[in-house]
Image (cartoon, grey):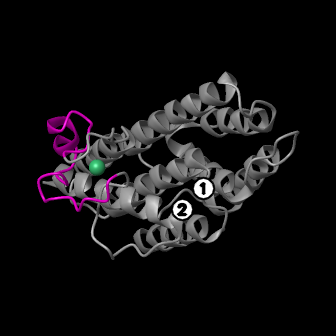
Amino acid sequence: MFGIFGSLLGSFTNVVVLRMAEGRSVVFPPSACPHCHHRLSALDLIPVFGWVLLLGKCRYCRAPIAIQYPLVELTAALILGSSFWFWGGGPRLVPTAAWSMIWLIQTLLLIREEVAAPGPFLWPLGAFAFLTWWVGGAWESAWTVAPLVGAAAGGLATWGPSPGRFFPWFGVGTAAALAIPAWGWGGPIVLLGLAGAFPHCRGSWAEKALKGGLLIHLGTGLALAIRFGLWS
Ligand SMILES: [Zn+2]
């Protein structure tokens, strides 16, 4: 049940990320194919399976549908499903699942590089701060270390011949630091390395390799934090 709810949340995430980049409303109009503008049916919108049943092509014009859609839906399903699996219905379920979803969205925004404003990156951190305060017993140094790691990641990524954007890296760096109880300092250190390399490898195969590394970093951090928790 949690996995199914997660896949729907992932589907909504795709809509939000896409429309935020284009500056459009999240609620209206209903989803349509970006290529032929045909309105999508309920069957087309089933998370993961919709994409698989259509073999990754629009039902109406056969234009390819990005693999991002089913991948984000599947990841969100795994996040909510496994958070419940390991933490049950206890008080730590909501912060664990919320933090993981926030980190997924931050990484997605960073890789797509379309949203420049700090808004989308700051509200999730505020939401996470509230959740950990509400549950209590969060990692005690989190609120001093996390912004410093985030600022270091943002600083490194904006320093070089082809600078990246500050706030996406700030958000992802903060999230990596909050997961220190699960994966130690290795996670933030690898992320700082990726941030430092980013401005030097734009527009080449190395940029794709770096973004691939970022996805592996995200997957590892999510898995460890959901399994072992954000609390020391
Ligand atoms: Zn179409």
Q: Disc number at residue 114? A: 1
Query: Helix or strand or loop: what does disc 1 sit on?
Result: loop
Going by the numbered disc 2, the residue's amino acid type is Ala
Query: Helix or strand or loop: what does disc 2 sit on?
Result: helix
Going by the numbered disc 1, the residue's amino acid type is Glu
Q: Nearer the viewer, residue 179 or 100?
A: 100
Residue drawn at 13 percent across, 59 percent down: 42
* Residue 116 percent across, percent down from the top left: 67, 62
Residue drawn at 86 percent across, 45 percent down: 159
The residue labelled by disc 2 is: 21
Give left or right: position of 157 versus 120: right
Q: Quadrant of residue 214?
A: top right
- Residues tagged 1 and 2 counted as in contact (Cβ below 8 A): yes
Give left or right: position of 119 versus 15: right
Q: Residues within 10 Å of mark 2 (few under 14, many from 20)?
A: some
Instruction: Answer whether residue 52 is magenta in the image.
Output: yes
Magenta stretch?
A: 36-59
* Residue 33 percent across, percent down from the top left: 31, 55
Q: Give how far apart the Cα atoms at labels 1 and 2 are.
A: 5 Å
Residue drawn at 33 percent across, 76 percent down: 28
Evaluate whether residue 232 shows in this view.
no
Placement of 26 over or under 85, stated as above or below: below
Placement of 118 over or under 203, stated as above or below: below
Instruction: Answer whether residue 162 is magenta in the image.
Output: no
Give left or right: position of 33 versus 168: left
Q: Earlier in the sequence, mark 1 or mark 2?
A: 2
